[in-house]
């Protein structure tokens, strides 16, 4: 069913908007659906999704259906990782890109040891916090150098007034590079942070395929995640109004609809609103 048709159904008589940020729904499942609006504080993003209650089935899925479901779950997981990374970067204004290389000449046997690199990175961020004199948000992603020279680290940080020499001394394991976009000032902080997140997302999970479950595709400083506020709304109009109210009643600069996301999207009808 097209999203436009479900919009009309979304105008039906549902319960008044209800805050579900901390308290999950309770009681028996409803036979009708509802619009759920979610806003991410400080990110300039909101989503509105049409949700129908799940209907159980006693039929056992075929092997082909199970394989398709597994592929779809992996794809959803990848999309979720990329969006969470983007929201973290935007919320914390991570507009600076750094690359930390490692000189493995004194211990070549460790150049593909992921645990060693993660430990080096965590030690580095402890020293960086001490240098800055405060807690700070960050994201880092590991990449195995295509030339076979082992790991190096891609980092997104806020705009810190720290020179390359001080950053390299704080890292202490090799050369560091700073990447500065020439159009950064034109983009604005949120757009630049989204661009940095898109760059980091290229490397998500490239090195974790053979190391087992439970390995993070990227690492972040804890305590800086974007706060999520969700609300069940009586209509699409009410849901959009809630998203705008959470973003200063501004008009979105971009609206994306699931009707335009292609056949591979198998989720519920959804709108994504982006604000400056």
Image: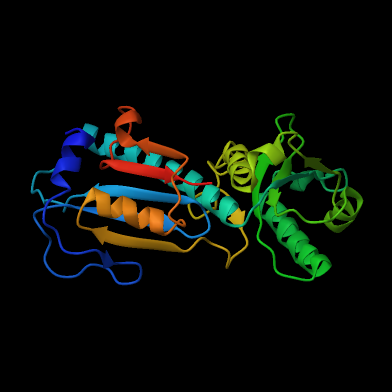
Viewport quadrant of the N terminus: top left
Whether residue 147 appears in this view of the structure is yes
18 sits to left or right of 198 = left
Along the line of sight, the residue nearer the viewer: 7 or 144: 7
Position in image of residue 46 (x %, y %): 41, 51
Residue 149, picture quadrant:
top right
Residue 242, picture quadrant:
bottom left
Along the line of sight, the residue nearer the viewer: 245 or 203: 245
Instruction: Name which residue lies at 79% across and 62% down.
Output: 128
Position in image of residue 181 (x %, y %): 73, 36
Position in image of residue 100 (x %, y %): 78, 46
Residue 133, picture quadrant:
bottom right
Position in image of residue 109 (x %, y %): 77, 45
107 sits to left or right of 234 = right
36 sits to left or right of 82 = left
Q: Is residue 247 above or below residue 152?
A: below
239 sits to left or right of 110 = left
Along the line of sight, the residue nearer the viewer: 246 or 43: 246
């Amino acid at each position: 069913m097209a999203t436009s048709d479900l919009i009309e159904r979304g105008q039906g008589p549902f319960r008044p908007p209800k805050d579900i940020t901390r308290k999950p729904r309770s009681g028996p499942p409803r036979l009708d659906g509802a619009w759920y609006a979610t806003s991410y504080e400080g990110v300039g993003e909101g989503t509105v999704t049409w949700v129908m209650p799940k209907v159980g089935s006693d039929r056992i899925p075929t092997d082909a259906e199970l394989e398709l479901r597994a592929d779809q779950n992996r794809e959803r997981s990848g999309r979720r990782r990329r969006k969470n990374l983007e929201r973290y970067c935007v919320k914390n204004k991570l507009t600076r890109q750094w690359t930390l290389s490692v000189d493995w000449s004194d211990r070549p046997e460790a150049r593909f040891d992921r645990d060693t690199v993660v430990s080096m990175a965590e030690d580095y961020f402890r020293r960086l916090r001490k240098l800055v004199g405060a807690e700070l948000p960050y994201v880092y992603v590991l990449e195995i150098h295509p030339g076979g020279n082992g790991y190096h680290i891609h980092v997104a940080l806020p705009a810190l007034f720290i020179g390359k020499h001080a950053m390299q001394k704080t890292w202490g394991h090799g050369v560091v590079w700073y990447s500065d976009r020439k159009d950064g000032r034109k983009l604005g902080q949120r757009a630049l942070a989204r661009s940095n997140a898109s760059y980091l997302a290229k490397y998500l999970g490239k090195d974790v395929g053979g190391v087992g479950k439970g390995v993070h595709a990227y690492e972040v400083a804890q305590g800086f995640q974007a706060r999520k506020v969700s609300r069940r709304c009586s209509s699409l109009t009410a849901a959009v109004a809630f998203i705008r109210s959470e973003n200063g009643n501004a008009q979105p600069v971009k609206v994306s609809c699931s009707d335009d996301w292609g056949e591979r999207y198998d989720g519920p009808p959804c709108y994504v609103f982006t604000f400056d």
